Every structure is written in structure tokens, then in C-alpha cells.
Amino acid sequence: EIDEYRYGMNRKKIDEEKAYDIIIDAHDSDSNPVTNFWKAVLADPQEPYYKSSRVEKNKCRATALYEMAVDSNIEEMAEAGDRYACVCLGRMYHRGRSLDQSYSTAVEW
């Protein structure tokens, strides 16, 4: 269910607040870098489009969550073919979040 809401795979109109609630309520976890990526996006003040009344924009928290995604092998997941990890990794390279900004690497993912 969380993937359907995160990526709109259900092809229905997406209830963004419900999607955000699912992500927010998930535990911070070293074992789920994709969830940590989306929690970071919600907390990231440089991502104003993504906002929830339940999450305060906080650069330090966002950075910690992006780093947790990297440390928990989001790149390994992407290399193994996980399409969600590929999207997240591409966005991290595109925006330079806990990785060196690289548009060419972003496009590869």
C-alpha cells in the first residue's frame, strides 16, 4: 500500500495527506532506505512542494534521513533493480542530497 501512495501506482487520484501519513507513521529504519528517503523529502525545507501538517521542515532532520538512506544501501537496492530505489537515488543525485550532485548520474538512475 505504501508504494502505491508514494508513487501513484494505483492510478487513482492520490490522497496526498494519506500517503504522507503512511510514510510519517513508518519507523525510521536502517532496513528501509526508500521510506527514509521520502521521510527526508517531507522534512527537507528545499522541497516545498512536499508538505504535511504533521512534519516540520528541518534541514538537520532531512539530512540525517538522506544519510540514513545512503548508509542503508539505497544504491545497492537500485543496482539490484528495485525501481523505487532507482527513482529515489536519481533524485538524490539530481538534488545533491547526501551525495555529490551529478545530473548525468541522476539520469542513469
Image (cartoon, rainbow, N blue to C red):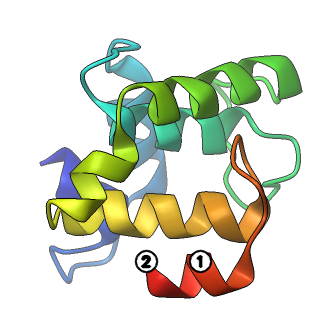
Residue ID for mark 1: 105
Q: Nearer the viewer, residue 5 or 95?
A: 95
Q: Nearer the viewer, residue 51 or 93?
A: 93
Residue 78 rendering spot, x and y as whole percentages:
28, 60
The kind of residue tagged 2 is Trp
Q: Is residue 81 left or right of residue 22?
A: left
Q: Does residue 52 appear in the picture of this structure?
A: no
Residue 21 rendering spot, x and y as whole percentages:
41, 32
Name the residue located 65 percent from the left edge and 86 percent from the top edge.
104
**Crowding at label 1, few (<14), some or many (≥20) Cα neighbours within 10 Å?**
some
**C-alpha gap between disc 1 and disc 2:** 7 Å
Residue ID for mark 2: 109
Residue 17 rendering spot, x and y as whole percentages:
47, 46
The kind of residue tagged 1 is Thr
- Asked if the residue under mark 2 is in contact with the one under mark 1, i.e. CB atoms within 8 Å, the reply is yes
Q: Nearer the viewer, residue 4 or 90?
A: 90
Q: Does residue 85 appear in the picture of this structure?
A: yes
Name the residue located 74 percent from the left edge and 73 percent from the top edge.
102
Label of residue 71 in the image: none
Q: Is residue 67 left or right of residue 28?
A: right
Q: Quadrant of residue 22?
A: top left
